[in-house]
Amino acid sequence: MEKALQTMIDNMPEKTGKSLEQWKSILSKKAFAKHSEGVNFLKKEHGVTHGFANTIVTLSKEENNTPEDLVSNQYKGKESLFPIYEKILATVKTFGTDVTITPKKTSVSVIRKRQFVLIKPATKTRIDLGLKLPEKLTTDRLGNSGPFGTMCTHRVQITSIDNIDDELIEWMKEAYIKAE
């Protein structure tokens, strides 16, 4: 499939009159609520065939964000939570050299052999910290996974850097140990 896509991209200037980068530049000046609106724009305004229009719109939506960009975007409008995020990362990095930090669009996974912590700025005033602690009972503070579903077994709601106390660090360390 990737070879076919590359062939399509290579043929784009000849078949559509513009390169993929030129099409991306044109689409970057527009704001389409739906994928189909972008496809229809290219078909009607530029005479691009459906297959090329669909490919151009799809590829123009792909974000080439660095991990730093992903994290920065998560904390836009939630900047007061960023010191909490940094303290959580600094803490989990002390557990071992095998800790991997993987930013995604809306959260950051902390992985050993498996994910053991998930950091998500949930609101402007709260980070939801997901933990993978199978067989551990829930408490008032160590709640069920909530919106994390099966990605985590538990969730701790953090509203202050002071919430990163010995108890929470022990839970994160326990999750780290179980993720080997």
Image (cartoon, helix red, strand yellow):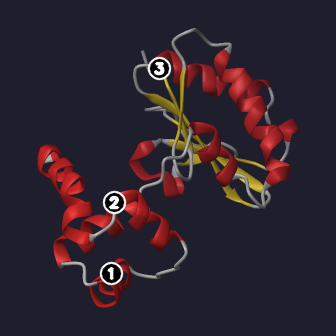
Residue depicted at x 80% and y 48%? 81
Q: Earlier in the sequence, mark 3 or mark 2?
A: 2
In three-dimensional space, the C-alpha distance between marks 3 and 2, rounded to whole angstroms, equals 42 Å
- In the image, taking residue 6 as reference, residue 46 lies left or right, namely right
In three-dimensional space, the C-alpha distance between marks 1 and 3, rounded to whole angstroms, equals 45 Å
- 163 relative to 4, above or below: above
* Helix, strand or loop under label 3: loop
Q: Where is residue 162 drawn, in percent x and y?
A: 87, 37
Within 10 Å of the Cα at label 2, are there few (<14), some (14-19), or many (20+) other Cα atoms?
A: some
Q: Residue under circle 2?
A: 19
Q: Nearer the viewer, mark 1 or mark 3?
A: 1
Q: Residue under circle 1?
A: 42
- 141 relative to 166, above or below: below
Q: Where is residue 13 drawn, in percent x and y?
A: 26, 61
- 170 relative to 48, above or below: above
In three-dimensional space, the C-alpha distance between marks 1 and 2, rounded to whole angstroms, equals 13 Å
Residue depicted at x 65% and y 22%? 92
Q: In the orientation shown, which residue stands out farthest toward the top?
A: 97
- In the image, taking residue 86 as reference, residue 135 lies left or right, namely left
Task: Indicate which disc residue 112 carries.
Answer: 3
Q: Amino acid at mark 3?
A: Arg
Question: 156 or 53, which is in the foreground?
Answer: 53
